[in-house]
Image (tube, rainbow, N blue to C red):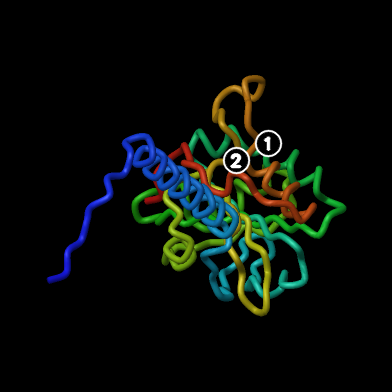
Amino acid sequence: MISCSFIPIPLFQIRHYIWSFVIDMKKIIVVFGLFIVYFGAFSQDIGDFTLPNVVDNTDFSLAQLSREKAIVIIFISGKCAFSQHYITRVKAIKDEFSNKPVKFVLINANNSDYVPEESVEAMKKFINTTNLAIPYLADKNKEVKNLLKATRTPEAFILQPKQGRFNIVYQGAIDDNPQAVGDIDHEYLRDALINLLNNTIIKINKTRPVGCLIK
């Protein structure tokens, strides 16, 4: 008959094993979190699209900008007060990066059946008052709005061209104060562009936009 004996493990040693396990699990969670942060911004991409540009009455294709390092798309509205507050800020950011491989595009996805002030003719009048000198695209069928899952105006996206596709590396608010320029603490769009151009990690790659719902 085989006999076996049980050797009791001291309590302090059990606690040591448990504590070591907890520490190891925390390390795994931290590493996994860093993985998500680093690759999260590059987890979505879109293909090319074509929309009418009301500035010059031509068709604009995203592929035209495939050689740029960054493409900034901003959904705006000619009626929404939040969008109007941001026009000067958008122009300031555009001018700051004018000598960089960055291009800016505005999109209006509001349906003029619901918002008459967002018709193509109204878009033309609006863009002429801004002095932005950038494409202003009419997305009346909400093709690109649905593609990017945009919800509000203004809402910004940074796309990075890569092998015929366009990675979404930032999505959300332009900054953290839609009303008072002097009280801005975080310039999300500008900071993300600087990170991208410097080949560093975009620390904040998604924020909640504040503005008018796209209708």
Instruction: Give SS at disc 1.
Output: helix
Q: Residues within 10 Å of mark 2 (few under 14, many from 20)?
A: many
Say above or below: 59 vs 214.
below
Tell which of 201 and 172 is nearer to you.
Answer: 201
Q: Residue at x 68, y 36 (%)?
A: 89
Q: Residue at x 72, y 42 (%)?
A: 91
Q: Residue at x 49, y 44 (%)?
A: 153
Residue topped by disc 2: 174
Q: Is residue 190 left or right of residue 30?
A: right
Say above or below: 185 vs 140.
above
Q: Marks 1 and 2: CB-CB under 8 Å?
A: yes
Instruction: Give SS at disc 2.
Output: loop
Q: Position of residue 69 (x, y in %)?
A: 75, 63
Q: Residue at x 46, y 45 (%)?
A: 26
Which of marks 2 and 1 precedes in the sequence?
A: 1
> In which quarter of the view is residue 1 placed?
bottom left
Q: Is residue 213 left or right of residue 98?
A: left
Q: Which residue is at the far bottom? A: 164
Residue topped by disc 1: 89
Q: Position of residue 36 (x, y in %)?
A: 52, 55
Q: Position of residue 123 (x, y in %)?
A: 56, 52
Q: Which residue is at the far right? A: 99
Name the kind of residue labelled 2 in the image. Answer: Ile
Q: Which residue is at the far front? A: 1
Q: Would you say residue 213 is visible in this rendering?
A: yes
